Image (tube, grey):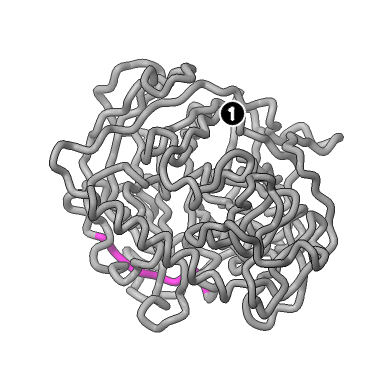
Amino acid sequence: MKNFHLKLILIFFIFFMCHACELPVTTTTTTITAESTTTTIPDLPADLIQPDDLTYMGAFRLPDRAEGAPDEESWEYGGQALAYYPDGDPSGAGDGYPGSLFGAGHNVYNYVSEISIPAPSTSRNIEELTTAATLQGFHDIRGGLFDSFNEIPRVGLEYLPAQSGQSSAKLYLAWGQHFQDDTSVNIPSHAWCELNLSSPHTQGAWWIGYESLYSVNGYLFSIPKAWADTHAGGMMLATGRFRDGGWSGMGPTLYACAPWLEGNPPAPGSHLTIRTLLRYSHTRGDDTTNFRLNNYQHSDEWEGGAWLSTSDGRTAVVFVGNKGSGYYWYGFFSPHGDGMPCVEQDLTMPGCYNSDGTECPPELTGYCEGNVPESRGWWSSRFDAQMLFYSPQDFAAVAAGTMQPYEPQPYATLDIDERLFLNATVEPYMLGSGDQRRYRIGSMGYDRDRGYLYVLELFADESKPVVHVWRIQ
């Protein structure tokens, strides 16, 4: 365990110390309050899923580390990737939650395991929650393709049944890391593998078109076949990433692809054909435009997504993560716990912003006493765990070329803080606390047939995630 914590500290140290070159190059004027709200735009089409259509079902725990197992074979510090498998656990309990979940464990290694889905509990006592069972233990499924990604890796997983030309169902993989400019890590990001984790036969890797790696390798989810056939040439796999500081784009990104349409498998190093569905301006390089998610902040975190659909034709595309509000700045956790900026000194670009995106007044931009160096990074006065709801009709318009990729905005948001445990006891200054608690949410999986959403709350069971469950009514 000593080595385990040393590795974690090293990872976080690298993460926060290397943020110094992630400062924004543009600002805008928008409006955001410091209050947590759930909003819906009135007079929306009836075929859109609304926040009120989601019913909370409860939560369940992930399995404990097996006695004597190494760090890489553990759910501790995990939660970057999650995928629902409808045919998993065929001899399960018959409790109304069939199927299984594939997920990534410890975030240094991201080995993948398969677990059962127990009926969730609504208890607010972690010890009273039901616990998933291990169906397949942790395995390294990278196939040697992504071994160079060791500086804060980013991972996505999704299951799809066998597609045209395939003889078996696949797990699709997205892999990257925090910085990807050096030659050794500027490599293709996507692959697929078999569902047998001990013999995955991983194939790839492939580029997502010619897009920046900072915008493609954070999450994966499936697109309903009818929509994909009508609007995206049969591309049923959605991928994207949100990278803090605006490097991926000032809001979540989304691209559709279909590796199976370009070979079985496509040749390694192929640039897959894609359809861009969502892409805001970014703060890297020479992009001088300023299109962004409404109320965007550089400290936002969008970690998972799902394309929702119901039997009666209602739809939505949902992203889940943390939304910042109030001041936001590059620096340190507020040492007095009051949400006031604690800004890094000697910055070459502005490091502090008001909630409307304008620069902070000079008296708020100084280097504050009492900060904890390990907390270095992007902060906001307040964070709230949220779901963003986008209209698939907007993405259809983008795919058709009648709307620009930066034009779609969420039609509703859902605050889910009240359902979380928010009881992290590890690394308090790195995670933050109270209103400034970061890293609340990890990835999510989606059971389309039954309408279940499985969302990971990070650091809820000591250092392990907990799975929260919602059902679309």
Q: Nearer the viewer, residue 366 or 280?
A: 366
Q: Nearer the viewer, residue 124 or 366?
A: 366
Q: Quadrant of residue 348?
A: bottom right
Q: Quadrant of residue 289?
A: bottom right
**Residue displayed at 54% across by 62% down:** 376
| Quadrant of the drawing holding the C terminus | top right
**Does the magenta run of residues contain 127?**
no
Query: Residue 71: where, in percent of width, then height?
Result: 23, 49
Where disc 1 sits, the SS reads: loop
Local crowd size for mark 1, using a 10 Å CA cut-off: few (<14), some (14–19), many (≥20):
few
Q: Relative to residue 191, is residue 106 depicted above or below? A: above
**Residue displayed at 46% across by 72% down:** 179
Q: Nearer the viewer, residue 328 or 120?
A: 328
Can the viewer see residue 450 in this picture? yes
Q: Relative to residue 146, is residue 327 depicted above or below? A: above
Lateral position of residue 259 relative to residue 334, left or right: left
Q: Nearer the viewer, residue 87 or 261?
A: 87
Secondary structure mostly taken by the magenta-highlighted segment of the chain: strand
**Residue displayed at 40% across by 38% down:** 465
Query: Residue 360: where, in percent of width, then height?
Result: 79, 63
Q: Relative to residue 10, is residue 269 depicted above or below? A: below
Lateral position of residue 358 relative to residue 457, left or right: right
Residue for badge 1 = 311
**Residue displayed at 32% across by 25% down:** 131
Q: Relative to residue 357, is residue 158 depicted above or below? A: above
Can the viewer see residue 240 in this picture? no
Query: Residue 370: where, in percent of width, then height?
Result: 58, 57
Residue extending furthest toward the left: 68
The magenta span reads 202-209
